[in-house]
Image: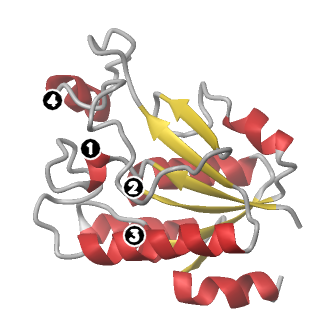
């Protein structure tokens, strides 16, 4: 089965302590190092086993004129002047970005499929199963997993490579995603894939 890893929003603005968006990680969150380590191991595992990596990023115009401010998350992005194209915040966190030749998809809503080329990229890669992880668990990860399941992909979520600024939301989102995906941790991913 053709498998692809979707790496969602491993960007400075949501993962670095100086990032302005705290939805995925509180400023002084003690879990930051563990999440970064799990994500790094996930990138290494996928690349080491020839699973294509698609890095998904969110970014907006410097004036945020392209942001539809219909809900809190987008109003907060504009108010904090965050995630602007070309800024440090929109860059990938050190060690968690794409390598040369890998696909990078940009989007501007919550669900990574909406208004992006993600579907086309996955068709090029002939994806049937998606490994998904990223920041934040209760936002882009949850909505993208639900969309992927609706589109017919088999989905695996690597929970310890995900994070939410609120641990309860992280845990409840992972529990919710068990309805439409396999939820695992990086240590168990190899045996899970071997058994399918």
Residue 131 location, x and y as percent? 65, 64
Tell me the number on the disc at residue 41. none
Asked if 26 appears above or below 160 in the picture, the reply is: above
> The N terminus is located in which quarter?
bottom right
Sequence-wise, which precedes: disc 2 or disc 3? 2
Residue beneath the point at 61% across and 46% down: 100
The residue where tag 3 is placed is 172
Sequence-wise, which precedes: disc 4 or disc 2? 4
Residue beneath the point at 58% across and 51% down: 99
Q: CA distance from mark 4 to mark 3?
A: 27 Å
Residue beneath the point at 54% across and 49% down: 98
* Cβ atoms at labels 2 and 3 below 8 Å apart: no
Asked which secondary structure carries label 2, the reply is loop
Residue 175 location, x and y as percent? 48, 73
Asked which secondary structure carries label 3, the reply is helix
- The local crowd at label 4, few if under 14, some if 14 to 19, many if 20 or more residues have their Cα within 10 Å, is few
- The local crowd at label 1, few if under 14, some if 14 to 19, many if 20 or more residues have their Cα within 10 Å, is many
Viewer-closest of 70 and 18: 18
The residue where tag 2 is placed is 135
The residue where tag 4 is placed is 80
Sequence-wise, which precedes: disc 1 or disc 2? 1
Of circles 4 and 3, the one toward us is 4
Sequence-wise, which precedes: disc 4 or disc 3? 4
Sequence-wise, which precedes: disc 4 or disc 1? 1
Residue 71 location, x and y as percent? 31, 28
In the image, 136: left or right of 159? left
């Amino acid at each position: 089965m053709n498998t692809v890893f979707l790496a969602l929003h491993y960007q400075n603005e949501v993962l670095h302590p100086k990032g302005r968006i705290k939805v995925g990680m509180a400023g002084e969150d003690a879990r930051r190092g563990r999440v970064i380590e799990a994500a790094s191991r996930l990138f290494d595992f996928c690349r080491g086993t020839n699973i294509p990596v698609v890095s998904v990023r969110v970014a907006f115009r410097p004036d945020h004129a392209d942001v539809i401010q219909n809900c809190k998350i987008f109003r907060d992005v504009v108010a904090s002047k965050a995630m602007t194209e070309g800024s440090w915040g929109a860059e990938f966190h050190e060690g968690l970005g794409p390598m040369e030749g890998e696909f990078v998809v940009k989007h501007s809503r919550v669900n990574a499929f909406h208004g992006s080329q993600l579907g086309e990229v996955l068709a090029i890669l002939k994806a049937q199963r998606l490994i998904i992880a990223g920041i934040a668990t209760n936002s882009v990860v949850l909505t993208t997993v639900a969309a992927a399941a609706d589109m017919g992909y088999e989905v695996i979520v690597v929970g310890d490579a995900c994070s939410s600024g609120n641990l309860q939301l992280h845990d409840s989102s992972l529990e919710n995603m068990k309805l439409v995906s396999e939820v695992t941790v990086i240590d168990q991913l190899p045996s899970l894939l071997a058994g399918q």
